[in-house]
Image (tube, grey):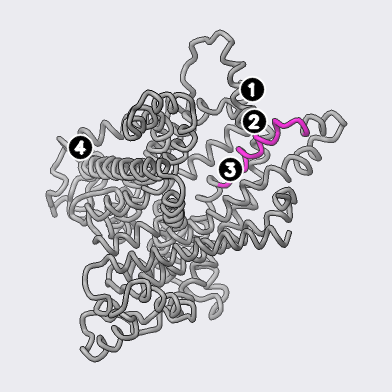
Amino acid sequence: MSIDSTTTGGASMKKPRRMKLPAPNAIVGGTLIGILLLAAGTGALWTPYDPLKLSFREKLAAPSALHWLGTDEFGRDVLSRLMAGAATSVWISILTVTLAVVFGTLIGLFSGYMRGWTDRIIMAFNDALLAFPGILLALGLLAVVGANKYGIIVALGIAYTPSVARVVRGTVLSLREREFIAASRVMGNAEAFTMARHILPNCIAPLTVLATSMFGYVLLAESALSFLGLGVPPPAPTWGNMLAGSRPYIGQAVWLGIFPGLAISLTLLGINLLGDAVRDRLDPRMRGSR
Amino acid sequence: MFRFALTRIGMALPTLLIVAVSVFVLIRLIPGDPAQLMLGDLATPASLADLRARLGLDQSLPVQFGIWIGNVLTGDFGQSISSQQAVLPLILQRFWISAQIVLVAVLLASCVAVPAGVIAAWKQDSAVDLGLVATATLLLSIPTFWLGLLLLLFFGLKLEWLPVVGYVSIAENPWAGILYLVMPIMTLFLHEIGVILRMARASTLEVLRLDYITHARAKGLSERAVLWRHAFKNAFGPTWTLIGLVLGNLLGGIAVVETVFTIPGLGRLLVDAIFARDYPVIQGCMLFVAFTYVLVNLVIDLCYPVFDPRVTAQ
């Protein structure tokens, strides 16, 4: 199958390429993620109101010119809290993905390099961790490290490490018998140098694809855990704990339940669309007859 | 066939063992005396000493693991700190509540999403395909806890068709029981349609490109026969595997939906146990859900040869 795809891919590459507009899903996805990053970047530095400031005279106020997205049960401005929440969520997701990528890469490189029994034992444990469904492993780890902002980063980071390790190890194993790796050895380079200089750069492409979709999973998991009350504790706003906080008031203040959920959904939609666009580019067979 | 089943079961056993080791190690990573953790702060010195002896805490870690796994295999998951109940019956009672929601939702979603995905692939790049894929991607992007909240807002509070929160056992009051389950099931159903439809479409697309489909068309079979008799049979494998993964993932993440609708299921049991630091229950839930996940995927794999006999040929 893989041979087949490379030969057809090679044949179509010969044709002169015309400049093409990016696919519509790449445009929409890119725009949504652009808005998210803009909101998060702005929210980290400036929000229209103080997201923590209580104002009981304005509690549960509907959206208006003063408060574009309304206020919550303590009179706090929803738009400001959404922006601050975006900053927190994006920051947590970036740290988590980085943690998983760094540890996963180290484990994958080591395991793929050692091969034999060391590799088999490491990978057996790695796959067993992948056998925990959904956010179950993160829930269990939270019970150990404690349910707070740092706990969530550690728990989700560890929970997503095995999938990174699996990808890196696969790349190492597929590369280590290739000529350019053998050449590096023959030149007398140390194994560690060969790994860092020649094998690691080849892991970057698959890792980028993985990290993009992982960013989406982590953001979703973070809001789910915050929704359960196991993530960032109130009063600090996250989209998940804003939704959880809206439940008692949802009958009288619909906007409290609408906007945070809309923010999460649009972000995930953006990541899914971007992911599809990347996959379509890498796998021309799925693109069809357009 | 028999050999295939045996190999596949043989592959699942080490996974189960390592999952058990992981859960054991995870709880032992918590600083402090394991006996104290398992009994809580109100334990008497006598009961602590008794449990220490029973867990074999004066012996090496592998021996401790052996004692623990022996207890687990005989159904002794320990005792809940907060409710003083045995953990396994507690888990089983909550498991049925979660399982009926997950199973019905995935069954319904598969019945809708698999044919829809095949049709989308057949009409690739048409308006129908585009509409189905867009809907699926949208549904997939809405987190279940928000989708549940929206349904609750619309059907529960605005239209007042369905009860808003709570749970009544179907065994006690069938009609009320079903009414309470409609919204949680609908939430998971809508979400999983997105996941399954995209998979069914992708795997059908792969198959529709193969030569034997061209051959089937060339010999004059109707499009319907080509699609459902030839393409669908081969395209269903990856989707079938995905359905197994979805079942397990839903069970692992059901806590959020149970929180939205205040349903006393397995997910809520685990989250409440984390809040209460009820370690025997945490340990039991993790082990139970992970084991169920491995077993569901084993059963899914064992069913595989029924519609694709090629997998049994080595």
**Which residue is the extreme one toward the right?**
B219
Q: Is residue B203 magenta?
A: yes
Badge 1 vs badge 2, beta-carbon distance below 8 Å: yes
Q: Which residue is mark 4?
A: A43
Q: Is residue A166 left or right of residue A93?
A: right
Foreground mark, 4 or 3?
A: 3
Q: Chain of mark 1?
A: A
Q: Is residue A80 magenta?
A: no
- Indicate the position of residue B163 as horizontal and vertical percent values: 46, 66
Q: Which residue is mark 3?
A: B199
Number of the label disc, if any, that sits on residue B300: none
Q: Which amino acid type is shown beneath numbered disc 3? A: Met
In front here: A54 or B55? Answer: B55
In three-dimensional space, the C-alpha distance between marks 1 and 2, rounded to whole angstroms, equals: 9 Å
Q: Please tell me whether residue A166 is drawn above or below residue B24 in the rendered image.
A: above
Q: Is residue A259 left or right of residue B45?
A: right
Foreground mark, 3 or 2?
A: 3
Q: Is residue A223 visible?
A: no
Which quarter of the picture shows residue A49?
top left
